[in-house]
Image (cartoon, rainbow, N blue to C red):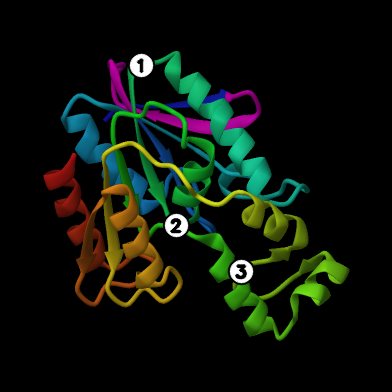
């Protein structure tokens, strides 16, 4: 599999496969990078079908881990839009793969884009309840988060500005034919929210029995690979 290291403005990125009229833009999740196991598997399977894959590092991830600016929702959305414009210069048909938070950023950034297809792994489809759950874990109220601005914690750093942005930008449109895979025991992205999203926008939802949020075991990754083979 051919792999080309590039930069999109200042953003480190990788192109997997030969140039093609079809390209999948892959967006990784939190605490991950452009070479995440799930993206590597996606690239292996997609390039076999003559499709090119483009992945990149979100702020404070991968090669950008030492950046000072935090990884905040609005910044990620802006970067995704820039990366998509670059992708449009490479291929006529653009599809999307999003993992966890990468799926959520994509929902915000690409709602109005004419994407061919989308595949989501363990997607965050509603960020507000997750933020509220983390606030509960930290034992803080909405007013306290506003006063503090930023709250570090073992799960995910909370930002008041992120919380306000998320509340002001609900996911109210999504058009591409979409396949979703989640783990049966995923406690981060609660089933009720993912199911509601799938039903609202006509997505095909599949669960891996016993699977978790983070697909990382041999069994989980093999299930993911077989799911891709069926759905690509």
Decide which of tag 2 and tag 1 comes sooner along the chain.
1
In the displayed structure image, the side of residue 126 where residue 210 appears, left or right: left
Instruction: In the rendered view, tell whether residue 128 sits above or below residue 165.
Output: below
- Local crowd size for mark 1, using a 10 Å CA cut-off: few (<14), some (14–19), many (≥20): some
Q: Secondary structure at mark 2?
A: loop
Q: Which residue is mark 1?
A: 91
Decide which of tag 3 and tag 1 comes sooner along the chain.
1
Residue 189 in view = yes
Which residue does the image show at 73% across and 46% down from the upper left?
67
Instruction: In the rendered view, tell whether residue 74 sits above or below residue 124.
Output: above
Q: Secondary structure at mark 1?
A: loop
Image quadrant assignment for residue 166: bottom right
Residue 164 numbered tag? none
Between 195 and 16, the residue placed more toward the observer is 195
Q: Which residue is mark 2?
A: 125
Farthest bottom residue? 139
Quadrant of the snapshot with the N terminus: top left
Residue 87 place in picture, x, y as percent: 45, 22
Which residue does the image show at 37% across and 57% down from the upper left?
197
The residues tagged by marks 3 and 1 sit, at their Cα atoms, a distance apart of 36 Å
Q: Which residue is mark 3?
A: 131
Residue 62 place in picture, x, y as percent: 56, 47
Is residue 169 covered in magenta? no
Residue 85 place in picture, x, y as percent: 51, 21
The residues tagged by marks 3 and 2 sit, at their Cα atoms, a distance apart of 12 Å
Q: Nearer the viewer, mark 2 or mark 1?
A: 2
Image quadrant assignment for residue 51: top left
Farthest left residue? 230
Which residue does the image show at 29% across and 29% down from the upper left?
116
Q: Secondary structure at mark 3?
A: helix
Residue 64 in view = no
Point out the stretch of residues depicted in magenta.
8-23
């Amino acid at each position: 599999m051919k792999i080309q290291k590039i930069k999109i403005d200042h953003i480190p990125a990788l192109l997997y496969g030969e140039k093609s009229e079809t390209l999948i833009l892959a967006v990784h999740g939190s605490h991950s990078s452009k070479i995440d196991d799930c993206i590597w598997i996606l690239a292996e399977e997609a390039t076999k079908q003559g499709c090119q894959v483009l992945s990149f590092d979100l702020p404070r991830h991968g090669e950008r881990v030492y950046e000072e600016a935090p990884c905040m929702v609005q910044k990620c959305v802006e970067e995704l839009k820039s990366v998509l414009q670059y992708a449009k210069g490479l291929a006529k048909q653009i599809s999307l793969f999003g993992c966890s938070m990468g799926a959520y950023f994509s929902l915000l950034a690409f709602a109005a884009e004419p994407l061919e297809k989308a595949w989501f792994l363990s997607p965050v489809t509603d960020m507000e309840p997750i933020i509220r759950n983390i606030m509960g874990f930290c034992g803080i109220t909405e007013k306290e988060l506003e006063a503090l601005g930023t709250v570090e914690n073992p799960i995910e750093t909370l930002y008041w500005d992120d919380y306000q942005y998320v509340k002001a930008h609900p996911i109210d449109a999504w058009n591409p034919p979409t396949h979703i895979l989640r783990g049966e025991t995923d406690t981060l992205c609660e089933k009720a929210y993912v199911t509601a999203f799938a039903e609202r926008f006509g997505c095909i939802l599949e669960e891996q029995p016993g699977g978790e949020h983070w697909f990382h075991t041999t069994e989980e990754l093999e299930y993911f690979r077989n799911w891709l083979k069926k759905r690509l």
